[in-house]
Structures are given as C-alpha cells and as structure tokens.
Image: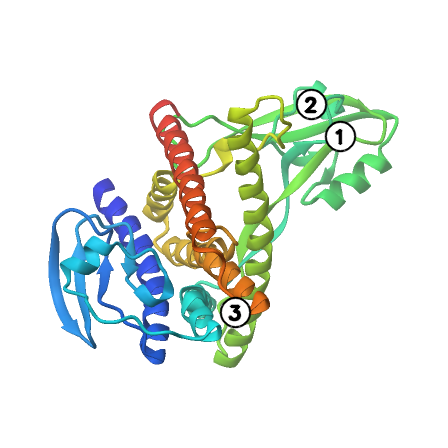
Amino acid sequence: MDFLLVLISVSMITVLIVVHEFGHFLAAKYYGFHTPVFGIGLPFGPSIDLFTRWGTQFKFYFALIGGFVAIPELGDESDPELLKKYNFDKPLREFSVGKRAIVASGGIVFNIIFAFLLAIVMSLTIGLPQAVPSNTISAFTGANSLAKKSGIQLGDQITKINTYEIKSGIDLQKTVKKLSNQKITLEIKRPIPNKEKKSNVKYQDVKLEIFSPGSLGVVLGHKKEYQSPEKNILNSVWKSFLFTAQTLIAMFISVIGIFYGLFQKLISLFNPNLASNQINLNDVKGIVGIVQIISQDIKTNAFMLLEFAYLLSLNLAVINLLPIPALDGGHLAFMAYEAVMKRKPPEKIQETAIQIGFIFLLSIIFITTLNDLKNWIFG
C-alpha cells in the first residue's frame, strides 16, 4: 500500500511537470517553433516511443519524475546529442523577443491555470481551505517568556484559563489581561509524541498554575478548516480565482525568502564569516520529503491529493518565474535585457550565467535531498 501511495505521489508530480512543459509546447507550436521531442519523464534510461505528431516525437521515460520539451530556437539548452538522436537537422528560425517570451512563460501560465481549475474542483467538492484562529501555541515571544519558563511547550493547546474558554489569540489576550496580577490555572492539551508519525494525534491533559502579570509570552497559531462546498458554479469560479491569486502572492513572497536564505547558506559554506539569516533546512523539503508528506497525508484523506496538486502546481509556477538562469525566469530576464538594449546578451556571459544557475539549483537539490533522507532515516 505504501508503495502505491508513493507511486501516486510521484505520478502527480510528473503530471504537474508535464502540464508545465505542455504550456511551452502549445505556445511554441502556435508560433511555429520547432519541437522535435516531448518527453514524459527525464531523458535518460529506458524509454518507450509513444507516437509522432505535429513534427514532434512523444516519448515516455521510466525515470518518471520530470518532463521536457526540446525547443532549439528558444535557446533552451536542448542537448545537441538528443536532437541528433531524433534526426533534427532543420535550420533554426528567428523569432521576436515577444514571441520567445510568450513561449518561455507558457509553462508558468499553464501551471497557474491548472491550479485555478483544481481550486474550482475543491470549491465544488470539499470546499476551499482556510486558516482560522486556534488555541495552539506556535511560538514564544522570547527567551524570558513566562509560559516557556513555566513548562508550556510548542504545540500545546490552551483550552481554558480558570473558567474562561480559549479558542484564539484574542480570547487569550483578553482573559490574561482580565486576570492579571493573580494566580491562574491553565488547562492544556499536550500532543503525545508519536514515533510512527501517524496523522491521528493523541493528547494528554495538563494543568498548570502560574502567577500572571498580564501576559504569558506566547503566540497562538492558526488551524486549517474547509469552507462549505460551493453550490453555485459562478461563485465557485470567482472564489477560486481570488483564492488562487492570494495563494500565488503569498507563495511568491515565501519562495523568494527561502531561496534567499538557501543562497546565503551556500555562500556561508565557502565563507563562514558571512552572516546568514539562519534558515532552518529542516523546514525546506526536497522531492523525497514532498513525496513522503503527500504519501502520509493521502493515506488518511484522499482529497488531500487535490490540495497538494494545487499547491505544487502554483509552487512550480512561482519557482520558474524567479530570474535564475536555467529556469524560465532566467530566460525571461535575458529576453528583457534584449528588449531594452536592442541586442542579445553576450553569448559567453549567458552560458556562464546558465552554468552558475544549474550549479545553484543542483546544490539546492543535493542539500534538500540529503536533508530529506536524514529526516527519513533518523526521524
């Protein structure tokens, strides 16, 4: 069963990448670019010839996580040996910056559209997810936090203070202020550590008595709930559009922060004296970690596959939009330079930048995969 869940997770990621590449493919075909080969999977190892249509050889590779479309006129680093293998010897055509930019951004656009369609499906079936206030402690306000010193732990749920029920940070703030400068009793539900990492968390009841000066020094987080499924299709489309736009903006800000932190981490490996923002690599998942999380969650709730597909599709769009050479955003950055300066960037500089981009991406893949394997083996 676990193998089947992993296979489902890997297949889902592959579908999202193929959707991305299909966006490039359709845009390229529309404008007359050559597309000698479209591959489902990574272009190495055993493969199956599917069919040839529209001047394109469609292939399936057993190295499943991935996909690609060769577009030589886009300067997409198509492997010359790969093109030679498929007898591609046609003269390359010249296309305007605008057309090349549309083709380069086709994958990003398709991932966003696909996520939007998934949001509509979620809205009509399980409802869109939303963050609502909770009584779970997500952080302490500092090392001198009264709650921390009193033995309260991250993840604890403060359910009551004396006779007052606590359901959110606002409830906590009002209650603690009302009962300031006196002894208070906190009723807490504390999660029991689960070595098997199952989703059904068990809790133990804890009671603490402390003297409150009017502040506990904690931050209560949020929990995820689902809205009621939408019955009106037009309302569903509008809500899904707003939800996708909000998620996209939040994800873009988050991904920029993560990549900046990872870049600082990589630099600090070569120069330890350089300060970094101390990003926690345990919070950054690679492909192994993502597959593991998806496999665990869909075991108890199959609909989580929809939500993961939605988030990963948007994540794929956002990452590719970053101006990193070797990604779509890098191509678009070079094209922006060409549009402004009325000439292409020097070929040597472009090649060097792409190589640096590949090294950076491979370093991130290596670090996150190593971290995933460490967490998987040692917990």
The numbered dot on residue 375 is none
Q: Position of residue 171 (x, y in %)?
A: 75, 44
Q: Residue at x 24, y 41 (%)?
A: 2
Q: Tell me the distance, in whole angstroms, between the alpha carbons under discs 1 and 2.
A: 8 Å
Indicate the amino acid at tag 2.
Answer: Lys
Indicate the amino acid at tag 3.
Answer: Ser
The numbered dot on residue 217 is 1
Which residue in the structure is indicated by mark 3? Answer: 240
What secondary structure is marked by label 2?
Answer: helix
N-terminal of the pair, mark 3 or mark 2, is: 2
Q: How many marks?
A: 3
Which residue in the structure is indicated by mark 2? Answer: 148
Which residue ends up furthest to the right in the rendered image?
181
Q: If the image is split into quadrants, where does the N terminus sit? A: top left
Q: Residue at x 14, y 58 (%)?
A: 85
Task: Tell us which disc is closer to us: 1 or 3.
Answer: 3
Residue nearest the observer in this picture, 227 or 235: 235
Q: If the image is split into quadrants, where does the C terminus sit? A: top left
What secondary structure is marked by label 3?
Answer: helix
Indicate the amino acid at tag 1.
Answer: Gly
